[in-house]
Image (tube, rainbow, N blue to C red):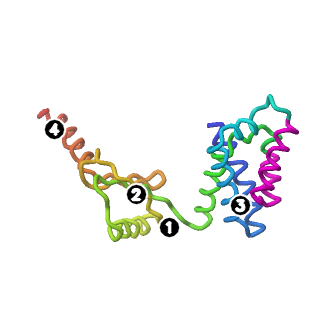
Amino acid sequence: MKNLIIAKKYAKALFNLALGEGKVDQYGEELDALAKLMQEMPDLSDALRNPLYPEAARKSLFFSVAENAGMSPILKSFVNLLIERGRVQHLSEIAEYYHRLIDEHANIARAQVKAAVELEEPVLEEIAKTLEKMTGKKVVVEFQQDPDLIGGVLAKIGDLVLDGSVRRQLLNFKETMKKGGLG
């Protein structure tokens, strides 16, 4: 829970700076690139996060990486602040929440849609249109095949869950049978 609070705080601060400068997407891309680099290079991540290394050495390492990557001055300062405050280990959560803020600002909702079989693009578009009517937001569908559903579709958008899967229907039927004394 504390990690989410930290991530929100820093992501909101960066997002507000980005809005003011009109660089919301640029900062998001730079944040993603650094988070990805730290994930792909655990030694770099450890060197930036580990308090056993002197802060000056961690900052120096980061600035050389940032220079090679062509990182913007604001993002350099932002990550420098994360290093100073011992928060750089939360970079991936900050990046994730930053993208939620981008979506919120653009009135976009992301829907996770699962089905037992691969769904064609027209079907996914129809699901998106239906969810857009329900939420009043532009919906981006992220599809995942899940054979455990047996059939039907499961859609989750924020806290809203629409479960039209055969698996759910069978579970509901089972519960009805138990309550009716037939199970």
Say which amino acid is labelled 1: Lys
Q: Quadrant of residue 105?
A: bottom right
Q: Secondary structure at mark 2?
A: strand
Q: Residue at x 82, y 50 (%)?
A: 64
| Picture disc at residue 177 | 4
Q: Considering depth in this image, is 66 or 147 the residue closer to the camera?
A: 66
Q: Secondary structure at mark 3?
A: helix
Say which amino acid is labelled 2: Phe
Q: Say how many tags the image has.
A: 4
Q: Earlier in the sequence, mark 3 or mark 1?
A: 3
Distance in Å between CA atoms under marks 3 and 1: 24 Å
- Looking at the rendered image, the disc whose residue lies closer to the viewer, 3 or 4, is 3
Distance in Å between CA atoms under marks 3 and 4: 55 Å
Magenta: predominant secondary structure element? helix
Residues at discs 2 and 4 in contact (Cβ within 8 Å): no
Say which amino acid is labelled 3: Tyr
| Picture disc at residue 137 | 1
Q: Secondary structure at mark 1?
A: loop
**Which residue was labeled with disc 3?**
27
